[in-house]
Image (cartoon, rainbow, N blue to C red):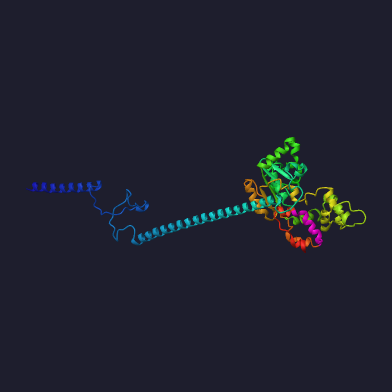
Amino acid sequence: MGTWRGLRVAFVLGSLFMILLIIVYWDDVGGFNLYPLQEPKHESLHPRATAGSPHSTSRPQNSSSSPVPTTARSTTLVSEETGGAAEEHTEEEGKEKQEQRQQETREDEEKERSRTTADNREQEDRKQRIMDVCSGKDAVEFPGSTRPFEQIPNRELDHLIVDDTHQIIYCYVPKVACTNWKRVMVVLSQSLISPSSGKPYTDPEAVPPDLVHNSSIHLTFAKFWRHYGSLSRHLMALKLQHYTKFLFVRDPFVRLISAFRNKFGRPNEDFYKQFGSVMLRRYANVSGSLPETAAEAFAAGIKPTFQQFITYLLDPETERESIFNEHWRQVYRLCHPCQVKYDFIGRLESLETDAEHLLKLLEVDHLLHFPSGARNRTAASWERDWFAQIPIAMRRELYKLYEPDFELFGYPKPDSTLHQ
């Protein structure tokens, strides 16, 4: 009996031992877990799994276990809504600004079209006026108005500058921005080399003003005979027909004042010897011999007055001696508007706008700009003061001398100067 009881106790103890081993074994291999479910200890080291990702865990959305608090969600939704509204507002502002810019562009284009239309209309009026005066409708007669172009002597065509590259003909009139327009022609024709670059000038303002008056750098109609011989007149006619022709004019009396100030208001040796000394000998009653140089004459206070200058212009002997100097020669004698049908007539009084319009017409506005140099300060308001000492009879006679220019280019008759 004792032996049997001992075997039973041993069997029970062995069974318990085996059960304990089985439990321990299954716990190690993961058959079941004796510990409650808990969050990983090192979650902060890994990015939080987002919804829909392979690592996301489905959890009940309650107040105790929700990963995003209600307040945070509300803030997020408000931020998203506010951000969306801000983006929408910014987009609307962008559209408004774009529409505003487009509207401003349309207005600028409309202004440009209106200005171009007005400029074209003004040009047509100027050209029509020349045609009317040349045809005799205004009953203004002047020498050479009816002669054909072929009868104009070559020496009288020396103011018509030709640029074959751009098919342009410019008739320059001294004291009417001709220095700057000659600069433009030099750049267009590439007729002058810059010593600094070794290449033709590309900027009119860089061209030295004293060089542009050197006649050798300009091709004029007066030089055609030397270049083309018997074909010269035929070539002139072809170029006059196909090239764009322009000139700039100015109030005739104001131009005279400007010429006098420039050539006799300060020492100028050439003009003193050729003209000033003549005026002084004829009209100044200077006793003894005149100073030989302009500098000496000015130092001694001996110089022509404006009245002596006008007297010289009206003196019949002056006209018999030679044609007027180009600085006071009438424009109709310089540029022959009755024989040359100009495509553009500019005025010094509207130089900036006329120059801009002309460069566009010539299709060279992308190549250069008209020089913005100092304007000639002689103004029409000066006429009364300058003519105050000139007798009325001389003023009226002077007007007759320049009346064709007044009429051809639409300048009003200076009644206040002629009657006061």
Residue 171 in percent (x, y) is at 72, 47
Task: Spot the residue most to the right.
Answer: 288
Quarter of the picture containing the C terminus is: bottom right
Front-most of residues 68 and 362: 362
Magenta range is: 389-403
Query: Which residue shows up at 76% across the image and 56% down it?
Result: 253
Task: Spot the residue most to the left.
Answer: 1
Residue 371 in sight: no
Front-most of residues 378 and 146: 146
Taking the magenta stretch, the answer to whether it contains residue 257 is no
Residue 386 in percent (x, y) is at 78, 60
Front-most of residues 81 and 183: 183
Taking the magenta stretch, the answer to whether it contains residue 394 is yes
Residue 203 in percent (x, y) is at 67, 46
224 displayed left or right of 302 = left
Query: Which residue shows up at 56% across the image and 54% down it?
Result: 110
71 displayed left or right of 226 = left
Front-most of residues 106 and 312: 312
Residue 96 in percent (x, y) is at 48, 57
* Most common SS among magenta residues: helix
**Count of numbered badges drawn on the protein:** 0
211 displayed left or right of 66 = right
Task: Spot the residue most to the bottom.
Answer: 420
Residue 84 in sight: yes
